[in-house]
């Protein structure tokens, strides 16, 4: 018979597998945009698609941030092996690296979408890389020479919601 902690760990692993599967499927979905050709699309339509894909990337990053932030809680409460980490998934890592390549090769209609997409995929990949691997991923991101020897760090900044998220909230009277 399994103890409560063993059941909780089993549920955690099941949840992790569900997150991992979703991340994989969602990344493939986003990649389809960058693989597709939109020769018939009007500029305005293409711009709207780019913005939706950029927002999808941001959502994917938030999922990774959630997993990363909760890793410490999981390790505190469960006796999981050091090798089990929600973001140690080689398949998803390779898929996200391919997505980074597609993003870097894509000709964005709006520079802001390109910048946000590149920074977002870089941030997502930062969650996956161990300290020894981080240096190899810095090639595509601009940085100062004095920062060359520093590893990217993960910093969370709490800020108010931006206008698109506030648009549908009822006004307080």
Image (cartoon, rainbow, N blue to C red):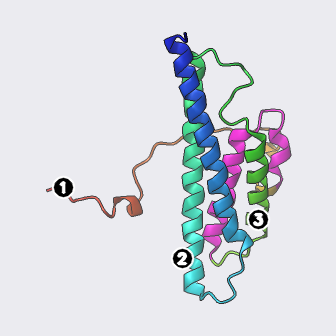
Which of the numbered marks, if any, corresponds to residue 172?
Answer: 1
* Percent position of residue 142, x then y: 76, 56
In the displayed structure, 10 sits above or below 136; it is above
Q: Quadrant of the C terminus?
A: bottom left
Viewer-nearest residue: 151 or 30: 30
- Please say if the residues under marks 3 and 2 sit with CB atoms less than 8 Å apart: no
Q: Residue at x 46, y 42 (%)?
A: 158
From the top left corner, tell me how far across and down residue 127 is, in percent.
Answer: 68, 40
> Is 153 rendered above or below residue 121?
above
Determine which of the numbered discs, if any, sits on residue 102 in the image: 3
Q: Main secondary structure of the magenta part?
A: helix
Q: Residues within 10 Å of mark 3 (few under 14, many from 20)?
A: some
Nearest to viewer (mark 1 / mark 3): 3
Q: Quadrant of residue 72?
A: top right
**Which image quarter is the N terminus in?**
top right
Question: Of marks 2 and 1, which one's residue comes earlier in the chain?
Answer: 2
- Residue situated in front as seen by the camera: 95 or 108: 95
Q: Quadrant of residue 156?
A: top right
Pick out the residue farthest to the left. 173
Q: Kindly tell me whether residue 155 is visible in this rendering.
A: no
Q: Image point 69% across, 67% down: which residue?
A: 32
The answer to if 112 sits in the magenta stretch is yes
In the rendered image, is residue 146 in sight?
yes
- Seen at 65% across and 72% down, the residue is 111
Please give left or right for residue 78 compared with residue 102 in the image: left
- According to the picture, the residue beneath numbered tag 2 turns out to be 48
Gap between marks 2 and 1, in whole Å? 31 Å
């Amino acid at each position: 018979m399994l103890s409560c902690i063993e059941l909780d760990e089993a549920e955690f692993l099941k949840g992790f597998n569900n997150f991992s599967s979703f991340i994989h499927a969602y990344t493939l979905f986003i990649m389809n945009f960058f693989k597709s050709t939109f020769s018939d699309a009007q500029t305005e339509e293409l711009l709207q698609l780019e913005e939706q894909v950029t927002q999808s990337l941001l959502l994917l990053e938030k999922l990774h941030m959630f997993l990363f932030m909760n890793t410490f809680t999981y390790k505190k409460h469960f006796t999981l092996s050091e090798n089990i980490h929600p973001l140690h998934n080689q398949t998803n890592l390779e898929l996200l690296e391919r997505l980074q390549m597609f993003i870097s090769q894509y000709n964005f209609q709006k520079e802001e979408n390109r910048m946000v997409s590149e920074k977002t995929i870089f941030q997502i990949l930062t969650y996956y890389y161990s300290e020894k691997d981080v240096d190899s991923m810095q090639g595509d991101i601009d940085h100062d020479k004095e920062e060359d020897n520093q590893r990217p760090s993960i910093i969370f900044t709490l800020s108010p919601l931006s206008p698109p998220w506030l648009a549908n909230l009822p006004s307080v009277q």
